[in-house]
Image (cartoon, grey):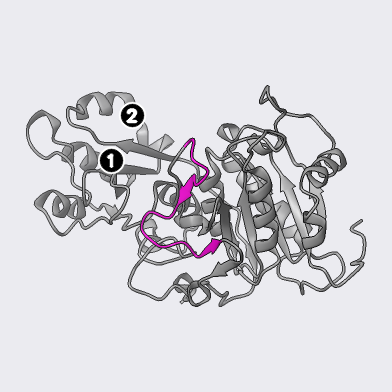
């Protein structure tokens, strides 16, 4: 049972899922500790957390983030919604003002994107963080990241965020850009929501506000495959790999094209016959770009226009992480086609010419 609020300080639920932050130093092995032991360790190394908020820690598992996938995302969404009291008044007994999710960095952006789609009408911050070095390591970034994440979880930012280094990022617009630098994450096609310096400076006009009540939408269809196009890719080999019963195992294919979404159209590398066969079999083709910044524009060149004629859907300026997780979320919602879902902004994951504060998926 959650203890009653003992002061006017904010209450933050910390969900520890594993990752580098909680590893032993110098071996970088997982520490199999009870939740209370993990919390005591955190508060010993980051005592200022007690000054920022009242902390309660839960430990659903202790995994390398490479092992975290759709079923874990669903469990996390349920834990966050139920334990934090999403949709209920934050001052109510047993509710938390915000959530911090400690997560390994490698797939953090996938988890953040998935949660952004599943926690609809989010009414308080859900902040993902981690570190490049363990908490106990010298010159570790864990202490600063964890402190900033807890502080952001006490603020009125009702979004799924990644707080890492000196940045406050929208989770479903983020990607891991560097495996070594302490500024590991960025929003390739947009500016950060905030910066962390002497103060936490938030670009408040760009913070999304809920336009509907909270709802937990955890259904996912993970039958999504991503294919990176490269010069020399043999479509016939790809067809053999996919097999004749591909439509029974895959419902969406994310094609990472060149530039604004182009794919080979001539000679042996012509990809269009394969894509036509997939769409004819009921597999939805989503075209994204390999470029780190920019957006798809399939109407610009003949190759792109041919993809549109074949029934392809554009990813616009979404990250790969958001594209894949949105496809999984959208495929589980039959009230709209996948193409219709990709034509609306659900959680701030895409720029479609609408203001950041509009939750256009509910229009």
Q: Position of residue 288 (x, y in %)?
A: 30, 49
Residue 82 or residue 172, whichever sits in front: 172
**Left or right for 263, reference 2:** left
In the rendered structure, which segment of residues is drawn in magenta?
A: 179-196
**Element assignment for label 1:** helix
**Element assignment for label 2:** helix
**Residue 81 is inside the magenta segment:** no
Residue occupying image coordinates x 65% and y 72% = 156
**Left or right for 16, reference 322:** right
**Left or right for 344, reference 46:** left
C-alpha distance separating marks 2 and 1? 10 Å
Q: Position of residue 30 (x, y in %)?
A: 71, 28
Residue 163, compared with residue 290, is above or below; it is below
Residue located beneath label 1 in the image? 278
Are discs 2 and 1 less than 8 Å apart at CB?
A: yes
Residue occupying image coordinates x 55% and y 58% = 116
Tell me, for residue 242, which label it has, or none.
2
Q: Position of residue 327 (x, y in %)?
A: 43, 51
């Amino acid at each position: 049972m959650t203890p009653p609020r003992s002061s006017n300080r904010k209450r933050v639920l910390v969900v520890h899922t594993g990752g580098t932050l909680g590893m032993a130093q110098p071996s970088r092995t997982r520490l199999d500790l009870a939740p209370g032991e993990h919390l005591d360790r955190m508060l010993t190394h980051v005592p200022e957390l007690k000054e920022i908020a009242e902390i309660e820690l839960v430990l659903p598992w202790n995994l390398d983030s490479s092992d975290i996938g759709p079923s874990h995302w669903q469990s996390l969404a349920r834990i966050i919604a139920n334990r934090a009291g999403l949709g209920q008044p934050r001052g109510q007994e047993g509710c938390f003002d915000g959530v911090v999710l400690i997560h390994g960095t490698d797939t953090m952006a996938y988890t953040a994107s998935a949660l952004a789609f599943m926690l609809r009408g989010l009414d308080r911050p859900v902040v993902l963080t981690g570190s490049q070095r363990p908490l106990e390591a010298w010159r570790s970034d864990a202490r600063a990241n964890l402190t900033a994440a807890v502080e952001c979880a006490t603020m009125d930012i009702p979004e799924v965020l990644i707080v890492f280094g000196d940045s406050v990022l929208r989770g479903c617009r983020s990607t891991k850009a560097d495996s070594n630098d302490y500024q590991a994450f960025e929003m390739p096609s947009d500016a950060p929501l905030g910066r962390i310096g002497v103060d936490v400076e938030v670009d408040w006009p760009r913070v999304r506000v809920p336009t509907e009540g909270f709802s937990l939408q955890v259904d996912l269809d993970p039958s999504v495959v991503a294919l990176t196009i490269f010069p020399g890719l043999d479509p016939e080999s790809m067809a053999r790999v996919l097999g004749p019963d591909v439509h029974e195992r895959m419902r969406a294919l994310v094609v990472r094209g060149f530039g604004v979404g182009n794919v080979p159209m001539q000679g042996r590398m012509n990809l269009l016959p394969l894509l036509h066969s997939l769409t004819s079999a009921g597999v939805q083709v989503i075209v994204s770009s390999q470029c780190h910044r920019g957006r798809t524009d399939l109407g610009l060149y003949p190759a792109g226009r041919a993809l549109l004629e074949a029934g392809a859907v554009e990813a616009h300026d979404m990250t790969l992480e958001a594209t894949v997780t949105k496809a999984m979320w959208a495929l589980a919602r039959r009230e709209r086609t996948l193409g219709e879902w990709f034509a609306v902004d659900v959680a701030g994951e895409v720029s479609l010419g609408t203001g950041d504060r509009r939750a256009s998926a509910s229009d």
